[in-house]
Image (tube, rainbow, N blue to C red):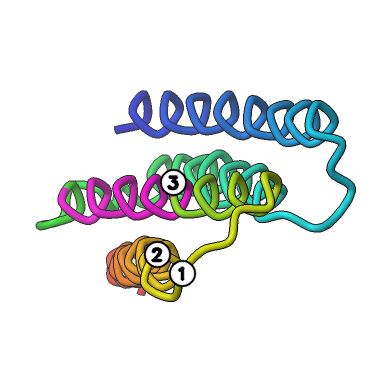
């Protein structure tokens, strides 16, 4: 699991950096100076991706919590949730930069996508923290 956490951390660091460069260059190319959800992708991937898995790496090294039941499933759900949220940020950000008028249904759909991603993130994060707590306490 140590290698897996290291690889996930590295992968999300790359995605976070790429999304930051994309945000900067895409807004510059489109002469956009306002606020956009694209800026949140960068911080979400670095914080909830890279840093989260670096922390799990340290916790695994010290407490070996990953051998418990359902930890692997929670990690899969976490990764799915993070990337669904990222897709939601991307869709929202692109429409903001392009100035696309969204009807209520499409606007709600994009919000719903991000919401589902955040729910999956929250559920799996709490589950993993409970598994760490079980090993520590």
**Residues at marks 2 and 3, CA–CA distance in whole angstroms:** 14 Å
The residue labelled by disc 2 is: 106
Asked whether the residues under the numbered discs 2 and 3 touch, taking CB atoms below 8 Å apart as contact, a structural biologist would say no
| Among the two numbered marks 3 and 1 on one chain, the one whose residue lies closer to the N terminus | 3
**Residue 83 lies in the magenta-colored region:** yes
User: Which numbered circle lies on residue 103?
Assistant: 1
Q: Name the side, left or right, on which 84 lies relative to 107.
A: left
**Residues at marks 3 and 1, CA–CA distance in whole angstroms:** 19 Å
Give the class, few, some or many, for how many residues have Cα within 10 Å of label 1's Cα (few <14, many ≥20).
few
Asked whether the residues under the numbered discs 1 and 2 touch, taking CB atoms below 8 Å apart as contact, a structural biologist would say yes
Check the image and report above or below for 13 versus 40: above
Tell me which corner region of the image, top left, top right, bottom left or bottom right, holds residue 132: bottom left
| Among the two numbered marks 2 and 3 on one chain, the one whose residue lies closer to the N terminus | 3
Residue 76 position in % (x across, y down): 23, 46
Residue 59 position in % (x across, y down): 45, 50
**Residues at marks 1 and 2, CA–CA distance in whole angstroms:** 6 Å
Q: Which residues are magenta?
A: 73-87
Secondary structure mostly seen in the magenta stretch: helix
**Residue 62 lies in the magenta-colored region:** no
Under tag 1, what secondary structure? loop
Residue 104 position in % (x across, y down): 44, 75
From the viewer's side, name the closer residue of 60 and 97. Answer: 97
Under tag 2, what secondary structure? helix
Between marks 3 and 1 in the image, the one whose residue lies nearer the viewer: 1
Residue 131 position in % (x across, y down): 28, 65
Give the class, few, some or many, for how many residues have Cα within 10 Å of label 3's Cα (few <14, many ≥20).
some
């Amino acid at each position: 699991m140590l290698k897996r956490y290291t690889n996930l951390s590295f992968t999300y660091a790359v995605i976070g950096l790429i999304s930051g460069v994309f945000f900067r260059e895409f807004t510059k190319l489109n002469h956009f100076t306002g606020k956009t959800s694209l800026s949140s992708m960068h911080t979400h991937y670095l914080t909830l991706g890279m840093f989260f898995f670096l922390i799990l790496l340290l916790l695994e090294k010290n407490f070996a919590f990953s051998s418990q039941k359902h930890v692997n499933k929670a990690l899969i759900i976490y990764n799915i949730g993070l990337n669904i949220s990222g897709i939601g940020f991307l869709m929202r950000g692109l429409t903001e930069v392009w100035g696309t008028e969204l009807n209520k249904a499409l606007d709600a759909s994009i919000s719903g996508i991000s919401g589902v991603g955040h729910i999956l993130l929250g559920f799996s994060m709490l589950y993993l923290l409970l598994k760490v707590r079980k090993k520590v306490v």
